[in-house]
Amino acid sequence: MIEYFFNAAPNPLKVSLFLEESGLDYTPVPIDTKRGDQHSAGYRAINPNAKVPAIRDGDTTVFDSNAILLYLAEKTGKFLPQPKQRGEMLSWLMFIATGVGPYSGQAFHFRNMAPEKLPYAIKRYHFETNRHWQIIEDRLEGRRYMMGDIYTIVDMAVWGWAPRIPFVLEEPDAFDRFKNIKRLLDELDARPAAVRAHALSANHAFQTEMDETAMRNLYPQIFAPDVV
């Protein structure tokens, strides 16, 4: 049985969707990052980076959400495109992992969490977040899914972060511009597996308050000595 270490953030949500879509047996293990569960020695043995999600599948541990998606897809043979599209799939999967997610997270951080409001940092990450999502939007033009007519792990990777677009861009009507992304979101949200994936997070009492303990656990660099 797969042990699945998760919380309610965008990256774990992708894996929740795959697990629910695939029907794999798994045991959910909530990791409350605001309370610091990710820094325990036991969890660091699973993910040295002290982030969620992660899985333990027998003797195999996998961390990083898109790596987990790929591992589980190859394990089950599900939600993969045709073999001739493998390179294209990997490109989009890594584009989301190294671009869309990080830029979206940093756009949120520098605008909302950083102790100093640095105009250039805010401008840079806002620009790059918008640019990356526009690439996804353009990719979906004329396509039902990211890989064409086939629902794959690339769509799950998009689905995890895309609901945050209006928030990270501070643009409530952003989906008026990102109509193709909104169409994909609406389709995936209607799937029973997506409903169950959301319910998995909602059924656990993760801390929501951003108190000083949470700030120290999530953003330790704020409290670290300045580097000269």
Image (cartoon, rainbow, N blue to C red):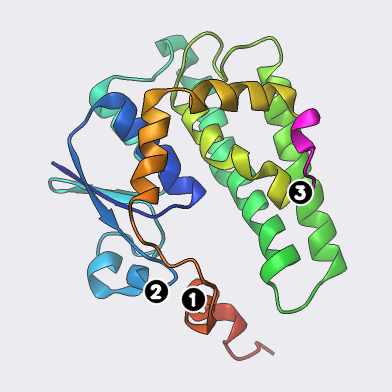
User: Which of the pair 128/31 is nearer the observer?
Assistant: 31
Label 2 sits on residue: 35
Q: Indicate the position of residue 170 as horizontal and vertical percent values.
A: 78, 51
Residue 83 appears in which quarter of the rendering? top left
Q: Indicate the position of residue 73 as horizontal and vertical percent values.
A: 32, 27
Residue at screen point 38% across, 38% down: 197
Q: Secondary structure at mark 2?
A: loop
Label 1 sits on residue: 214
Q: Eyeballing the image, is 222 above or below 39? A: below
N-term-proximal mark, 2 vs 1: 2
Quadrant in which the C terminus appears: bottom right
Residue 162 appears in which quarter of the rendering? top right
Q: Indicate the position of residue 1 as horizontal and vertical percent values.
A: 13, 41
Q: Disc number at residue 169? A: 3
Q: Secondary structure at mark 3?
A: loop
Residues packed near mark 1 inside 10 Å, few (<14), some (14 to 19) or many (20 plus):
some
Do the residues under discs 2 and 1 have CB atoms within 8 angstroms? yes
Q: Marks 3/2: CA distance?
A: 27 Å
